[in-house]
Amino acid sequence: MVVSTCGVFLLFSTKSPICSVFCAIMLKTPGGKKGNDVVSTRILVVDDHGSLRKSVAEFLRKQDGVEMVEEAANGVEALKQLSEQTFDILVTDIVMPMMDGYMLLEEMKRMQLSPMPKTIVTTALGRDDFVVRAVELGAMYYMVKPFEPEYLMGHIRELVGKSAMPIQHMPAMSTTHVQSLDERLGNLFLTIGIPAHIKGYQFLRQGIKMVIEQPDMINRITKELYPSIAKHFGTSASKVERAIRHAIEVAWNRGRIDTLNSAFGCKVCTPEDKPTNGEFIAMLADKLSLERSA
């Protein structure tokens, strides 16, 4: 199905035998050339999933016309590379520690890079609002994982005007990626509006993981959980408590409570009924524990 709106083409297909869902978005460029004189392409691949990032980067390095492929594990590393050298293409995930993909795209706009890399977003998040936000921040394609690297290379060819060049194939990548606990937590936090750059994000993630491993720790949140998180990050228990409270407040102020209820499949919260730190940690830890045991 193809939809055109405000100069943006959206292509959705679920018929591919290779990937469960494939979603691509291309920014319309009226009157643009179908080809150009670019003879080499410089690509930056940004993804915190190390093995996936390396396999994609290695595949891209084997393609004709690709001059260089660099890697970054998060938005902070990507910005450093973008400030030191120029790239034609940026391939980035959304959910990453320290700085997520949305913040990376926002910072790139503020940096006013010249030339500005053309962006392809690759993520496990396929919701409409995530897609719209990525497009608003400049993404030209939005690909939902898992996908075959040949699809990615095809979009890169189109963006740099090399669609006629042959694509070198590689052994099929696994399409059944089981999300790690960190990835699942990252998706949940992003869904409900907790940004990766605030301290409470890391403290919450660590606290939920601890409660999943030792469920009774939630009953000793002040005496044991906060101090354990503080020790892990080299800070104080009081700072952990305040940062987690701030993270929850950020989520509630962004008004994404409906998305949290949708994630649980029932109404667990209301805008007027903000949970305590302990209630929030216990709620997410219980949900993820059930998912792991399913």
Image: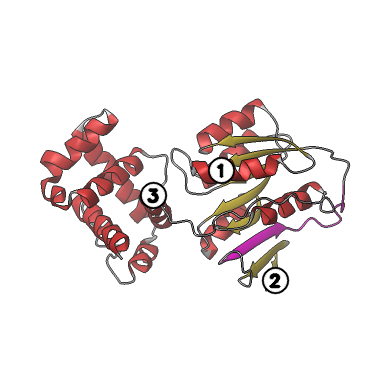
In x, y percent, where is residue 257? 35, 62
Q: Which residue is mark 1?
A: 53
Looking at the rendered image, the disc whose residue lies closer to the viewer, 3 or 2, is: 2
Q: Nearer the viewer, residue 88 or 131?
A: 88
Mark 1 belongs to which amino acid? Answer: Arg
Q: Nearer the viewer, residue 23 or 104?
A: 23
Mark 3 belongs to which amino acid? Answer: Ile
| Quarter the C terminus occupies | bottom left
- Residue 2's disc is 2
Q: Residue furthest top?
A: 84
Looking at the rendered image, the disc whose residue lies closer to the viewer, 3 or 1, is: 1
Q: Few, some or many C-alpha atoms within 10 Å of disc 3 (few <14, some 14-19, many ≥20)? A: many
In x, y percent, where is residue 182? 38, 48
Q: Is residue 179 magenta?
A: no
Residue at image coords 11%, 46%: 220
Residue at image coords 22%, 40%: 241
Q: Is residue 246 visible?
A: no
Q: Earlier in the sequence, mark 3 or mark 2?
A: 2
Q: Is residue 203 visible?
A: yes
Query: Which SS class for mark 1?
Result: helix
Residue at image coords 54%, 46%: 52
The span picked out in magenta is: 21-35
Query: Which SS class for mark 2?
Result: strand
In x, y percent, where is residue 242? 24, 40
Mark 2 belongs to which amino acid? Answer: Val
Q: Residue 288, relative to residue 88: is it above or below?
A: below
Q: Earlier in the sequence, mark 1 or mark 2?
A: 2
